[in-house]
Image (tube, rainbow, N blue to C red):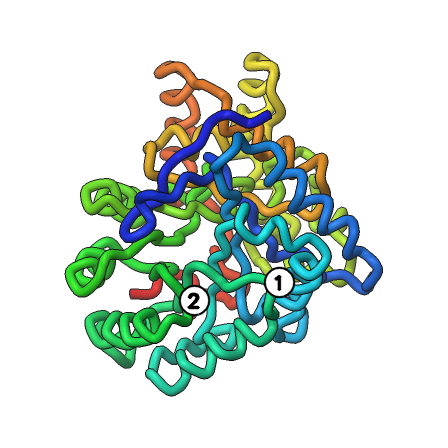
C-alpha cells in the first residue's frame, strides 16, 4: 500500500490525495477500442493503493483523444458507471476551453460551453472536481479569466480552480482574484528551467499545489524506448521534435546517469525520476501517465521513495545541466506553443 499522501492547495486544502497523481491522457488513444477493462484496472490499482480517506488525483481533458474529442472523458464515464463506489475516492481535474494545438478561448461563452460539454461526457455518476483552462488566453487579462471561472464555480459546475501552463506572475495575479488549487506545468529532468523554478517557488509561497506533468520525459526515462521507432505508428509522440531520432539520442545522453543512480538505489529509473520531482517540494505532485495497472503501481510507489540530500543534488545537477541543452520543441505543436503561455 502507498502510504505517502499530501494535501491539495488553495480551496482544496482539506483534501488528502496520493503523493503521485494519475494522468489519463494515453487512455483511449489506440486503435483498439476493447481496452476499457485494462484502463479501469489501471485506475482502480492506483486508488486501491492509497490509505483510507485519501483520494487519487486523476487528470483528464475535454480534448484527450486523437480527434480532439471527449473520448477520454467518455471512458471515465463508463468507469464510474461500472464502479460508482470509486467516485468519492477520486479527485478529477479536467482541462478545457481549448482547441488544439494553439487556440485557447477563456471567454465566458466558451468556458461555459466547455464545462457543460465536460460534464455531459463524464456522465451522471461523477461530477468533476476542478476545472483548468488548458492554456492562458492571451487575448484576456488573467483577472478577467479568473472572474469568469469564479462565476462558473459559484454556479456549481465545479468546486476548485486550476491553471495550466501559467507563469509565476500570472499565478500570483490569479490567486489574488480567487485561490488557485493547482498550477499544472511540465517538470522533469528535461524541463527544470528558470520558469519552472519560479512557478514552483511562487506556488509554494501561495499555498498552491504544482501538478508536475511529464516527469518521465514523455515516457523515455522508463528505459522502455530508445528510439521513436519503438513507438506504435499511431502514437501522438511522433509529433514531438524533441523525440525525433538524432535529437532523442542527444537528449537521452543528458540523463544517461539516471539508470545508474536508479540501480544504486534499487528502484526503477522511472521511479527515481518521479521521486526527484516530488522531492523538489512538498507541494509538488508528480503527474505521470499510465494505462496499465502494473505501471500505475510502479509510479505510485515512487511517492514512498525517500531521497537523501546527496541523491537529490545529483539528480538536480543532471536537470540543471540539461536546462537549455535539450534539442527539439517542448510541445508537440512546435515552437509557437513551446513556451509557458502567460
Of residue 317 and residue 46, the one placed in the foreground of this image is 46
The numbered disc on residue 223 is none
Q: Which residue is mark 1?
A: 239
Q: Quadrant of the C terminus?
A: bottom left
In the displayed structure image, the side of residue 175 where residue 182 appears, left or right: right
Callout 2–callout 1 Cβ contact below 8 Å: no
Of residue 296 and residue 228, the one placed in the foreground of this image is 296
In the figure, 73 relative to 55: above or below? below
Name the residue located 39 percent from the left edge and 52 percent from the top edge.
185
Mark 2 packing: few (<14 Cα in 10 Å), some, or many (20+)? Answer: many
In the displayed structure image, the side of residue 247 where residue 209 appears, left or right: left
Picture quadrant where residue 204 is located: top left
Picture quadrant where residue 30 is located: bottom right
The numbered disc on residue 134 is 2
Name the residue located 55 percent from the left edge and 43 percent from the top edge.
288
Q: Position of residue 214 (x, y in %)?
A: 51, 47
In the displayed structure image, the side of residue 331 where residue 79 appears, left or right: right
Q: Position of residue 122 (x, y in %)?
A: 59, 68
Amino acid at each position: 500500500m502507498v502510504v505517502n499522501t499530501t494535501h491539495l492547495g488553495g480551496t482544496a486544502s482539506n483534501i488528502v490525495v496520493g503523493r503521485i497523481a494519475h494522468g489519463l491522457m494515453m487512455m483511449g488513444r489506440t486503435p483498439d477500442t476493447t481496452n476499457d477493462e485494462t484502463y479501469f484496472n489501471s485506475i482502480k490499482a492506483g486508488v486501491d493503493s492509497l490509505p483510507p480517506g485519501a483520494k487519487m488525483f486523476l487528470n483528464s481533458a475535454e480534448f484527450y483523444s486523437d480527434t480532439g474529442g471527449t473520448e477520454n472523458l467518455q471512458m471515465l464515464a463508463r468507469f464510474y458507471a461500472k464502479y460508482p463506489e470509486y467516485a468519492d475516492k477520486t479527485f478529477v481535474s479536467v482541462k478545457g476551453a481549448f482547441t488544439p494545438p494553439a487556440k485557447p478561448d477563456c471567454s465566458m461563452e466558451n468556458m461555459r460551453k466547455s464545462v457543460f460539454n465536460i460534464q455531459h461526457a463524464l456522465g451522471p455518476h461523477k461530477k468533476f472536481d476542478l476545472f483548468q483552462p488548458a492554456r492562458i488566453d492571451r487575448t484576456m487579462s488573467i483577472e478577467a479569466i479568473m472572474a469568469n471561472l469564479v462565476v462558473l464555480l459559484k454556479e456549481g459546475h465545479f468546486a476548485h480552480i486550476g491553471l495550466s501552463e501559467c507563469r509565476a506572475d500570472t499565478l500570483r495575479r490569479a490567486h489574488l482574484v480567487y485561490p488557485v488549487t493547482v498550477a499544472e506545468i511540465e517538470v522533469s529532468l528535461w524541463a527544470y528551467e528558470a520558469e519552472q523554478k519560479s512557478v514552483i517557488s511562487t506556488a509554494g509561497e501561495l499555498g498552491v499545489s504544482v501538478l508536475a506533468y511529464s516527469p518521465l520525459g514523455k515516457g523515455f526515462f522508463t528505459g522502455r524506448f530508445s528510439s521513436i521507432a519503438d513507438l506504435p505508428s499511431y502514437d501522438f509522440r511522433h509529433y514531438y521534435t524533441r523525440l525525433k531520432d538524432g535529437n532523442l539520442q542527444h537528449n537521452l545522453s543528458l540523463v544517461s546517469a539516471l539508470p545508474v543512480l536508479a540501480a544504486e538505489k534499487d528502484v526503477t529509473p522511472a521511479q527515481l525520476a518521479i521521486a526527484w520531482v516530488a522531492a523538489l517540494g512538498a507541494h509538488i505532485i508528480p503527474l505521470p501517465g499510465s494505462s496499465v495497472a502494473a505501471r500505475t503501481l510502479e509510479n505510485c510507489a515512487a511517492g514512498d521513495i525517500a531521497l537523501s540530500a546527496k541523491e537529490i543534488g545529483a539528480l538536480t545537477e543532471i536537470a540543471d545541466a540539461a536546462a537549455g541543452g535539450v534539442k527539439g520543441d517542448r510541445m508537440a505543436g512546435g515552437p509557437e506553443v513551446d513556451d509557458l503561455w502567460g
